[in-house]
Image (tube, grey):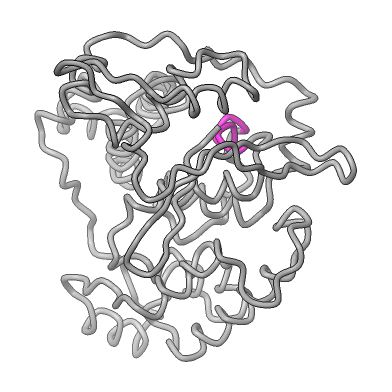
Amino acid sequence: MYLATITHGASKSYQIRQSYLNTENNTFQHRIIFDLGENPSDYMENLGEVVVFFSSELENAISKYTQTDPDTILEKLLWDFLPWETRERLSRFNRTDYDIPKPISENDRAEISRQIHIFDRRRLYYLYYGAIDQSKLFSMRETVFRPLFRQSRDEREYHLTQMEHRLEPGEYRNYIYAIFNLHTHFTVSYATFLPEALPQDQIADYFLEELCELNSSRFFLQFDEGRGSLHPHLRRYLYMFFDFSPRNRTFGNDFVRQFINNHRTFRWPEKRTEVSSERILEIFGYNFDELKKMNKKTLTRLYRKKALELHPDQGGDQEKFVELTEIYSILQKGQP
């Protein structure tokens, strides 16, 4: 089950929904379990300072579709609406109500290949690695797709929307460029990684073409038909592209202009990590100078070991994993 947020102009309303397998077309659809209206707190009763009871009406609705304790589900789904005293109390306890991820079977791999749309793959790739160049897209491990496995299009979009909240508005344009694979419309060598150097009006035209094509894809929408306009879950990309300006890089326009005029002699400026030396020591167990002295084989072995420990799919720290990868990519350029 998941919480859907429906926007109505300046107001919002909320629904608890659930994905289920539609056996008629073998796709995952969603159903509404309970409509919470504009204020989910109406279905909570505070007893004392830290105890919250959910209404029997809400609990009964949840119980019809799961055998899990409804209070456990509701605490997770409505966490942001609980009083802060209740959240503080609950956060002190280690929750053991989640399933420990199991190894992905061959059947699961085949289902992931069938279920996960290429557009979902591109979005996850950028959101995990921040890469405009997605040439290594298909080297991603299947575990990355686990959060989207056996979900309806609706549930996937709410999950990805939450991940997109981590993006800065200044990088929306690069995000759109990468996930809609817009570089394929250009023939210049730098199109895969430098959209700033391309004609922005052309990028906008190609973006709209790709967006309309995606909107007509029955496979992407999981046969959610009957709409004569842009699907509600795709509208946010229009806002991202047209309502926000790209981030001004520190060397911005001069860098792009120089590259366009003389790209045959172009060299990337040396990239330096913004991660503190203390943080590098905490993540790798070695300081930056020690890491720079390692040969490529030793550094790669260390990186893989740490990546397995820190990868979010293995229960690791997302922020440390990103920093680990950033430092490793910078060190790689100077390895023998």
Residue stretch in magenta:
142-148
Residue 159 visible in image: no
In front of the other: 1 or 161: 1
Does residue 51 appear to the left or right of 163 in the view shown? left
The spot of residue 205 in percent (x, y) is 55, 87
Q: Residue at x 14, y 18 (%)?
A: 49
In front of the other: 12 or 251: 12
Q: Quadrant of the C terminus?
A: top left
Q: Quadrant of the N terminus?
A: top right
Quadrant in the picture for residue 119: bottom right
Q: Residue at x 27, y 9 (%)?
A: 93
Residue 325 visible in image: yes
Residue 59 falls inside the magenta stretch: no
The spot of residue 31 in percent (x, y) is 66, 42
Q: Residue at x 22, y 77 (%)?
A: 252
Establish if 129 lies above or below 6: above
Q: Residue at x 47, y 75 (%)?
A: 238
Question: Looking at the image, how many numbered discs can be counted on the residues?
Answer: 0
